[in-house]
Amino acid sequence: MEKHSIVIYILLTIIVTNLIRVTPMVFIKGQIRNRFVRSFLYYVPYVTLAVMTFPDMVLTTPTLWPGIFALLAGIIAAWFRLGLFPVAAICCVVTYLLL
């Protein structure tokens, strides 16, 4: 791969990433007052994390059961309002013990 094409790809990535971040600030002036939009924006990071994490968590193990039990342990730990790191640690320990 040529050196100038890598630079072009990096610049294109920077432009697209910044457009995604800057566009809402350009079009939205002031605080968002709509309750639906505010709640939607509040949950977007959690949904994104869940969509990226859950399939890999279940399907990465050699068999399906350790991943499913780790997922259930994570849901129970999150239900008791543990933080992200303790929930992830519990899921890792459950998976390790069941393998």
Image (spheres, rainbow, N blue to C red):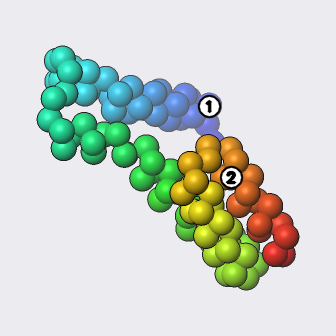
**Distance of label 2 from label 1 (alpha carbons):** 39 Å
Report which quarter residue 77 is drawn in. bottom right
Q: Is residue 93 above or below residue 38?
A: below
Q: Is there any visible trace of residue 32 in the rendered image? A: yes
Q: Position of residue 51 (x, y in %)?
A: 47, 59
The one of 32 and 26 positioned closer to us in this rendering: 32
Which residue lies at the image location 27% right of the left edge and 42% below the top edge? Answer: 39
Secondary structure under tag 2 reads helix
Few, some or many residues within 10 Å of mark 1 (<14, 14–19, 20+): few
Q: Tell me the quarter of the picture where residue 76 sits.
A: bottom right
| Side (left or right) of 8 relative to 29 | right
> What residue sits right under mark 1 in the picture?
3
Q: Nearer the viewer, residue 56 or 20?
A: 56
Label number found at residue 88: 2
CB atoms at circles 2 and 1 under 8 Å apart?
no
Amino acid of disc 1: Lys
Q: How dense is the environment of label 2, judged by Cα within 10 Å: few (below 14), some, or many (20 and up)? A: some
- Mark 2 or 1 closer to N-term? 1
Q: Which mark identifies residue 15?
A: none
Q: Position of residue 72 (x, y in %)?
A: 61, 70
The kind of residue tagged 2 is Ala
Examine the rendered structure and indicate whether residue 64 appears above or below residue 23.
below
Q: Is residue 18 left or right of residue 64?
A: left
Question: In the image, what residue occupies the spot 38% across and 33% down?
Answer: 16
Q: Check the picture and name the quadrant holding the N terminus.
A: top right
| Spot occupied by residue 89 in the image (x, y as percentages of width and height) | 74, 52
Rendered view: 44 above or below 90: above
